[in-house]
Image (cartoon, rainbow, N blue to C red):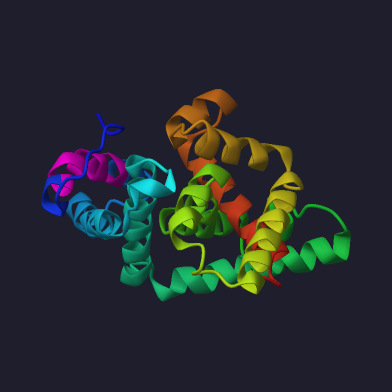
């Protein structure tokens, strides 16, 4: 349905590809807290679709579905960022956890355990797990915002002049650093990220595979994200 595109007015494109907006919004909705409304995501995605319709050039080679999907997804994520529904205390505690991890790992020369991070923070293990749970519920994880190389190619066919050479080099360097940091995570954290982002399983399904509760999967996911933050501290 989405692969066949003729030269049509923008209002016809919007009508034709509205189901794509809803599908992408529903996919992202599964990664967000219940306080975020699907209608708000769809509204933002429609803005992305309108931008795609106005900028798309068929002669550049990429399909409209690919290009529009990137625009829609980006518009939704930008709106979530602008909304910043995360309480400041959650941001603050996330920074505290990441710094505690960094301190322990710098001192010990290995992955920091839950107990060690809790001790570094001067809190109980259950309190530490509560901080991880809060962080997970407030997180649209950065790995989920990255497009793959084929997606990037589609965008750059149209917008290659928007990134300066130095920005492009910096982006590539960060991606390499992120991939390396993910590869160095503890095995269980790597597995949770792979199942969540690559296999697109939900937390309950991952818990069944690992034999742990859904809340424990949430904690592991959040801990992986904060460990990456601590190890990539030098990057903006």
Quarter the N terminus occupies: top left
Main secondary structure found in the magenta portion: helix
Residue 80 location in percent, x, y?
Answer: 34, 63
Q: The magenta stretch spans which residues?
A: 13-25
Q: Is 23 contained in the magenta span?
A: yes
Residue positioned most to the front = 59
* Camera-side residue of 205 and 84: 84
Q: Is residue 95 left or right of residue 83?
A: right
Vertical comparison of 125 with 170: above or below: above
Q: Position of residue 191 (x, y in %)?
A: 63, 35
Rendered-image quadrant of the C terminus: bottom right
Q: Position of residue 178 (x, y in %)?
A: 68, 55
Viewer-nearest residue: 185 or 8: 8
Q: Is residue 129 above or below residue 119?
A: above
**Whether residue 122 is situated above or below residue 10 in the rendered picture:** below
Determine whether, in the image, residue 44 is placed left or right of residue 90. left
Q: Is residue 149 visible?
A: yes
Q: Residue at x 72, y 62 (%)?
A: 231
Viewed as shown, does residue 31 lie left or right of 141? left
């Amino acid at each position: 349905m989405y692969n066949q595109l003729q030269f049509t007015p923008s209002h016809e494109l919007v009508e034709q590809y509205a189901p794509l907006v809803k599908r992408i919004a529903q996919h992202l909705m599964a990664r967000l807290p219940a306080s975020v409304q699907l209608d708000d995501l769809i509204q933002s995605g429609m803005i992305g679709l309108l931008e795609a319709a106005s900028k798309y050039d068929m002669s550049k080679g990429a399909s409209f579905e690919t290009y529009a999907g990137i625009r829609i997804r980006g518009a939704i994520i930008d709106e979530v960022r602008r909304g910043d529904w995360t309480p400041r205390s959650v941001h603050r505690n996330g920074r505290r956890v990441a710094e505690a991890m960094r301190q322990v790992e710098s001192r010990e020369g290995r992955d920091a355990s839950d107990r060690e991070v809790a001790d570094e923070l001067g809190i109980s293990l259950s309190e530490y797990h509560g901080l991880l749970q809060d962080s997970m519920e407030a997180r649209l994880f950065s790995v989920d915002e990255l497009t793959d190389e084929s997606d990037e190619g589609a965008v750059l066919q149209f917008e290659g002049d928007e990134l300066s050479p130095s920005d492009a080099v910096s982006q590539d360097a960060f991606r390499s650093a992120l991939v390396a940091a993910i590869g160095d995570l503890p095995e269980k954290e790597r597995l949770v990220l792979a199942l969540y982002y690559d296999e697109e399983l939900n937390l309950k399904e991952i818990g069944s595979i690992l034999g742990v509760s859904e809340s424990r999967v949430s904690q592991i996911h959040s801990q992986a994200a904060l460990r990456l933050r601590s190890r990539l501290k030098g990057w903006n």
